[in-house]
Image (cartoon, rainbow, N blue to C red):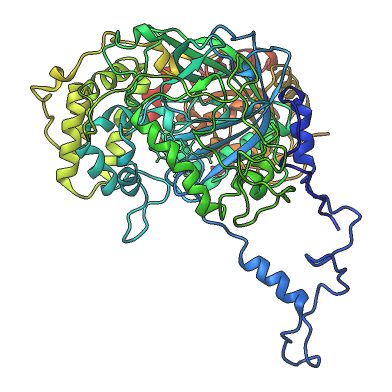
Amino acid sequence: MAMEKQPPEGGVARTPSQSNTNKKVESLETFRSDATNQALTTNQGVKIADNQNTLRAGERGPSLLEDFIMREKITHFDHERIPERIVHARGSAAHGVFKVYESQAELTKAAFLQDPSKETPVYVRFSTVQGSRGSADTVRDVRGFAVKFYTEEGNFDLVGNNMPVFFIQDAIKFPDFVHAVKPEPHNEMPQGASAHDTFWDFVSLVPESAHMVLWTMSDRAIPRSLRTMEGFGIHTFRFINAQGKGRFVKFHWRPTIGSASLLWDEAQKLAGKDSDFHRRDLWEAIDNGDYPEWELGVQIVEEEDEHKFDFDLLDPTKIIPEELVPLKMIGKLTLNRNPDNFFAETEQVAFCPGHIVPGIDFTNDPLLQGRLFSYTDTQISRLGGPNFHEIPINRPLAPLANGQRDAMHRQTIDKGQASYEPNSIDGGWPKETPPAASGGGFESYTERVEGSKIRVRSPSFKDHYSQATLFWNSMTDPEKDHIVGAYSFELSKVERKHIRERQLGILANIDETLAARVAENLGLPAPKKNADADELGKSSVTESPALSIVAKTKPSIKTRKVAILAAPGADAASIKAVQDALKAEGAHAKVISPTLGSPAQGIEADATILGMPSIMFDGVIVAGGKDSAKTLSESGDARHFVLEAFKHLKAIGAIGDGEDLLAAAHLPGGEEGVAVGSDANAVLKSFIEAMSKHRVWSRAQKAESVPA
Ligand code: HDE
């Protein structure tokens, strides 16, 4: 029998300092089941002799109710699914570790932020928001970026997104927002997309959404990879140090390989050709040893500076521009292990913004305050009761003991008679731990609060446009074009004209040129800014390069994917040269051929042209060899492959006769980002240089006329 016994849990006296990374791994290992060399059994441990046939009365007779083996198997199967998450249903996750660069004792007493030699285990789940569990990865949507730190002082969940702001300011609006963005209730369409009437109806009526909607219409909503996304805690939190001093903090995750996005055309095609595109990319990167990494950055604001900004720190629709408060990088997150079982780990992991540890605390952000309630509540119906913390992936590394008992699916066998505190029967255990500079019990930060019991929005939350304008002004030209394209695409799908017009009004309050460009595509008159829009507030920062992805591109091709197009008769030497050069740069090359088999001596095709189209790669190189070039030039699929790569602004290279394919596809040589020639090394040099910029932006206008 494969299952192992549960370890003892409640009431075990262990000191907090005992734990380390290995313990988490060990504690999870205790629950892992490996059926190697195990007999097939029922859930009661009875060995099964026949797993092929139901017990029946006679060879051709009816099945018998007494067949406990068949009934147990089918009953369990009937209940395999649990409710998917109401939002963020589609997700992928991985194990990893977090290490702080140096002690952050001045800022916080949180134990996992003190010692640079210590590794804290983490489990990180990325997700889309709108679509159901089986929806496509590359839809236009916000991405969840949820990190569970298994610290020695208990679990800390940083449940963030890949955008630093949110659609609404108050938690009470969340069900409205989610009902509007989810597929429409009458026909359950569209899946995984916000391009429909109810979403735009809601956001055009709720101007506080303007800033975040602009982010979702930007390239941030179609990341190239989960590994190239930034992450944000969004809300302002607090750090508290050992002396009890509190400071405000915003959390940021920055990918070390830099940020990159898809183009909208690629994202849409990928949704059909590989709906697991992001999930696969994350899995393969970890499998290949290309461990994804992010730096943790913090923006710190002293308490006395709380009111010095032109926005409210408690307003989750605002960023703190880095020009006002720079990012301080304090540590690194590395994802280094794929899960063993999707359901047990990724589907059952339960995050909650309320899971914090001493040294970290909340603020009064009204969105955060509502979230503190919602997440535990949702787990109760999703995971079947209040014992979800006992599921292996959710168990803290820190020892736990309390008087909580029973309930659905309780696994712990609590010893002793006293499930209350104080008690004199079990020696008074478990007992409170007074707060202390380190290792003490959790103590909420003391904050003076006074006011009337009222339902109002603070007037300091009323500026809905100036940071949206800041975002728009900080975009490069191609990014602005993409934003115009995204609003135009989405609003063109909205059936009700009055909704399109109302949203254009919001855009005019952000930027009249933006509104005019979208209006033109919708065949509507360009609206003017509302007379009072500027009265609502002004941003002291008017441009912030940190908000642009293109402006921050890191020149590297590390972990990027390159297709080497080759047909039978290809030149093996040039293929080998390409493979070696790309490997040396940390990129991955795949040989793509019209059919599987061997296009050149000693070279095997990794995939077919139709099986792995150009949208799955960051660049394409056509191998040399006369026969190969002839076959490729005559193939519509091969011509489409390079045309599409050209349209998507990817680096293209052709060695020797390989250039014939570019000519057959009517791709002129000498274009920026198109390297051709008989010297493989020279071609590779320019190819690598072009690909390290991720895309050849200067080609954008020309690419528009390419029909691929
Ligand atoms: Fe969530 N959110 N949320 N959210 N959220 C959930 O919890 C909720 C918000 C975020 O990978 C749910 O376990 C409310 C902001 C992520 O498992 C639910 C409000 C941010 C994930 C819930 C918000 C997030 C969730 C659904 C407004 C970024 C996926 C399933 C007050 C800072 C975590 C679940 C994972 C999931 C409620 C707004 C991020 C229903 C009420 C803002 C990354 O509890």
**Looking at the image, which residue sits at the far front?**
424
Above or below, 236 against 306 in this view is: below
**Ligand 1, what quadrant?**
top left
Location of residue 80 in the rendering, given as x and y in whole percent from the top left corner: 62, 61
Could you tell me which quadrant the C terminus lies in? Answer: top left
* Residue drawn 20% across the image and 23% down it: 459
Is residue 315 positioned above or below 502 on the image? above
Observer-nearest residue: 237 or 527? 237
Is residue 134 in view from this perspective?
no
Please indicate whether residue 530 sits to the left or right of residue 107 in the image.
Answer: left
Instruction: Return the x and y of residue 308 as percentages of the image width and height.
Output: 30, 8
Q: Quadrant of residue 65?
A: bottom right
Task: Pinpoint residue 295: horizontal percent, then vertical percent.
Answer: 58, 17
Q: In the shown orientation, is residue 462 left or right of residue 344? A: left
Count of marks, rendered view = 0
Question: Which quarter of the image is occupied by the N terminus?
Answer: bottom right
Looking at the image, which is closer to me, 454 or 352? 454
Residue 183 x, y percent position in the rendering: 36, 52
Query: Which of the 4 quarters of the picture holds residue 372?
Result: top left
Seen at 32% across and 10% down, the residue is: 543
Task: Please tell me which residue lies in front, 534 or 635.
Answer: 534
Residue at the farthest right position: 37
Q: Residue at x 37, y 15 (%)?
A: 320
Question: Does residue 27 appear in the picture of this structure?
Answer: yes
* Residue pictured at 74% horizontal, 26% vertical: 15
Of residues 346 and 22, the one drawn nearer to the viewer in this rendering: 22
